[in-house]
Amino acid sequence: MFFEKLSKVDLNLLLTLHLLLEEKSVTRAAQRLCLSQSAVSKNLAKLREQFNDPLFTRTAYGLLPTAKARNLQLQLQTLLSHLESITESATFEPQRSHYRFRVGLVESTYPLLLPHFMSYILNEAPNVMLDTHAWDTNTLKKLQSGEMDIGITGKDLDPKYANITMQMPADIRGQEIYRDSQMCLVRQDHPVLTQEWTLDTYLQQRHVQVRCDGKDQWLLDYKLADKGLERSIGIIVPDFNSAASLCTHTDLVFTAPSHFIKLIAKQLNLVVLPLPTELPQMAYTLFWHQQKDNDAANCWLRNIIISHCKDLSASTIADTQ
């Protein structure tokens, strides 16, 4: 009975459904499948018949998945990831591969880490693509389901707070890449520049905060709370660049990893200040699912990132000694 049902499944139709769920557009799905729009529309009609559900409704903003389609999406992601693993060669040949690596990255890794290894990847694997996405609350689940290959984000080193700021599943592996401390950013002629820069001065200011991993607070806020203190947050924004930009024309203070602070300060002509309280360093960490431990393509990418960021880590350790 199982084989009779399985023989009726058209994997090409399932791939079409997967891309329609991703793109919410027949046109874009057709482009990725290298098919005509009419061919994808015919496939959608077959899918509707197979699942006895409309699957999508058309809106001014694209295709809106039905409840049935949304329920199928996670199952499809897992299934197609497993199929991809089965069909992949036991070895990985960078020069011949057309692999599409799906990578989740916290925003500050783009200026910090990618310049150290992207040129090498582009030279060694000219047809490989890195499909990057912002690290968010679903990234770990996507690593588990196989929808994403690797992820890089910051992890608190203080054991007391590490599980609060990031709930790490047991089947997720990690490798530390780079440690960084926090610094502050203010505009030129900010009033604090004429004052003694102390923790009291810092806490008297209004702050801009970046929402990370879906959270409005991070380790600094928990450490301050232990002392019965808190920052006055004036605005919460989704990304680092927006936060820094706000500092150019307000009296807001932005606290972020030092490498980003120093880089953006030069670009926007802002002033860098130390964080006036002790705070453990955070570690930029490479994450992947345990099922990818011996995956040839995944190992290749992980090894490149780790090896090409060694000098960066070494220089950081030297700076802290």
Image (tube, rainbow, N blue to C red):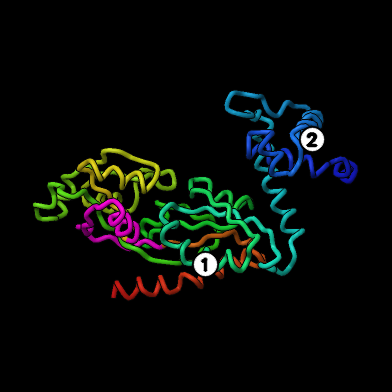
Circle on res. 305: 1
Mark 1 neighbour class, 10 Å CA radius: few under 14, some 14 to 19, many 20 or more: many
In the image: residue 33, left or right of residue 103: right
Q: Give the camera-side residue of 147 and 187.
A: 187
Q: Is residue 66 left or right of residue 164?
A: right
Density class for disc 2 (Cα within 10 Å; few <14, some 14-19, many ≥20) is few
Q: Quadrant of residue 43?
A: top right
Residue at horizontal 69%, vertical 41%?
31
Q: Give whichever of discs 2 and 1 has the lower sequence position.
A: 2
Is residue 17 within the magenta segment? Answer: no
Instruction: Name above or below for residue 59 compared with residue 145.
Output: above
- The answer to the question of whether label 2 and label 1 lie on touching residues, with beta carbons closer than 8 A, is no
Q: Secondary structure at mark 1?
A: helix
Disc marking residue 268? none
Which quadrant: the N terminus?
top right
| The magenta segment | 259-283
